[in-house]
Amino acid sequence: MMNVKETIEAGKAILGIEFGSTRIKAVLIDEANKPIAQGSHEWENSLVDGLWTYSIDEIWAGLQDCYAELLKDVRRQYDCSIEKLAAIGVSAMMHGYMAFGADDNILVPFRTWRNTNTGEAAAALSQLFVFNIPLRWSISHLYQCVLEDSEHVQNIKYLTTLAGYIHWKLTGEKVLGIGDASGMLPIDPDTKDYNKDMVRKFDELVSPKEYTWKLLDILPKVLVAGEQAGSLTEAGAKLLDVSGTLKAGVPFCPPEGDAGTGMVATNAVKQRTGNVSAGTSSFSMIVLEKNLSEPSEMIDMVTTPDGSLVAMVHCNNCTSDLNAWVKLFKEYQELLGIPVNMNAIYEALYNNALKGDADCGGVLSYNYISGEPVTGLNEGRPLIVRSANDNFNLANFIRTNLYASVAVLKIGNDILFKKEDVKVDRITGHGGLFKTKGVGQRILSAALNSPISVMETAGEGGAWGIALLAGYAINNKSGLCLADYLDNVVFEGCTGTEISPLPEEVEGFNKYIEAYRSGLAIEQAAVKYKS
């Protein structure tokens, strides 16, 4: 305890902050990269005028509350405060659209990754670039606004992501880590910068509009892991710490997206490694040895925080509907006057689900809170589908919801493993789905027909990952590449626990996914007829 207190008081601790879809989290780590304190703030996106958003006020109130909670944890554990830090890193949900004008104010409400209104733009850009451009990427949002002749487009002076925005306001620097930048516009892996040919094509495409800007004029500068990305300004310190205790001058690493920090937190930035992040949304990241044979609408090509090529399968929906069902059991316990322990509820339901049928007894779940581009749905309607003859019981009910959490992920990864013959030595899972020991791991193992590892640090997630990147930026005196730094400095001796797929469960999941694909017409009908 005294050593940790001395670390904090000496300003040697490192802070990582990540804006997730439902929680903002801050993690403080020591010189050995171990988490020593944390704070969090719960929040939810809002559907405003048909678009998913968080307000600017919510962003800053959430960050300030999260940091205040971190300070409370530090005082409670170590009886001290934070005046100085060794480094800070900011991460957030990737992609989306934040456009700012000449007065640095946002021109239209923040449009998150969850929005699927950009179909026309994404299709046109994919054809123009001969490269899959997902609906949620910033360039899709920008071009959709161009197609709709949105008045604000003419006035754009800066376009960035949520992580880039927070970083800009705290440091004054308009920069972005390469992993997050690859979700704005495709990156050239050779130059570690935006693809110049695609930049040229886009500028030519919109030239008839006679905007005052060119694309590179409004995009953030691309940085790779290990580079300096500015320092905390006086104004930034006041924004972050309303108590006024934190001093300016703290160095920052490049801001990154949650996909990149997930790769770091699971030590999956080396070729032939991969990770799966499973929470509100889910995505798998497989670091490739070579490019894919052809573009696929289900596979997004992004990069690691140090610029290596990554095949990403991104699913808009994962545990939100599952969590909603679990909350019903919480309400039931409260109705009966039984003390509620959410961890105990999750543990009991999840472990009981493993007693269900390998194919969920025929019961299907579609967890589409929002649209799901991988399966062609612009909107979502959560559904449970069963026939009178299906084996409908509690175990199968929870099991089908667990299967649904990774079903779309399996559909996308089947392209990589079966069609593209991509080889992977290790896949590591992290995120809320894996908090109940062994269950989410076993489900994902059956879905991907691959061993899945989970480390003890899996629950720390992206906030820890961006703290590690901040540490890499200031502590990598030996000049190690990011993969070697993680192997030799952060994760040395940490292998985690591995679960291999059981043949009968792989067979059951395959049977489930066959029925799931066939039943997508039911989901499509629900979207059409249930407003």
Image (tube, helix red, strand yellow):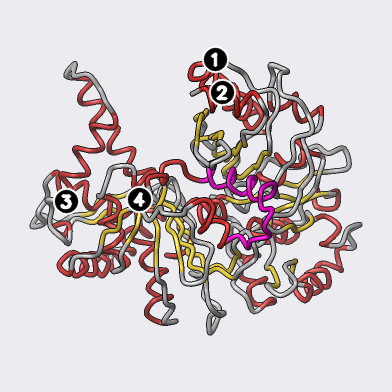
State the separation of the CA atoms marked 1 and 3: 44 Å
The kind of residue tagged 4 is: Asn
Mark linked to residue 354: 3
Q: Nearer the viewer, mark 2 or mark 1?
A: 2
Visible in this render: residue 380?
no
- The residue that mark 4 highlights is 367
- Above/below status of 177 relative to 412: above
Q: Position of residue 118 (x, y in %)?
A: 61, 59
The image shows residue 304 at horizontal and vertical percentages of 59, 62
Q: Is residue 280 left or right of residue 338?
A: right
Mark 1 secondary-structure assignment: loop
Task: Please provide the residue range marked out in magenta.
Answer: 462-482
Identity of the residue drawn at 81% across and 67% down: 206
State which tag comes first along the sequence, 4 or 2.
2
Eye-nearest disc, 4 or 2 = 2
- Residue located beneath label 1 in the image: 79
Q: Disc 4, disc 3: CB below 8 Å?
A: no
Task: Name the amino acid, label 1.
Answer: Asp
Of callouts 4 and 3, the N-terminal one: 3
Amino acid type at image mark 3 = Leu
Foreground tag (1 vs 3): 1
Q: Which residue is mark 2?
A: 5
Sequence-wise, the earlier of marks 2 and 3 is 2
- The amino acid type of the residue labelled 2 equals Lys
Pointers 2 and 1 in contact (C-beta within 8 Å): yes
Q: Residues within 10 Å of mark 3 (few under 14, many from 20)?
A: some
Q: SS of the residue at dot 4?
A: loop
Residue density around tag 2, few if under 14, some if 14–19, many if 20 or more, within 10 Å: many
Q: Residues within 10 Å of mark 1 (few under 14, many from 20)?
A: few
Q: Residues within 10 Å of mark 4 (few under 14, many from 20)?
A: many
Tell me what residue is drawn at x 19 percent, y 16 percent. Answer: 337
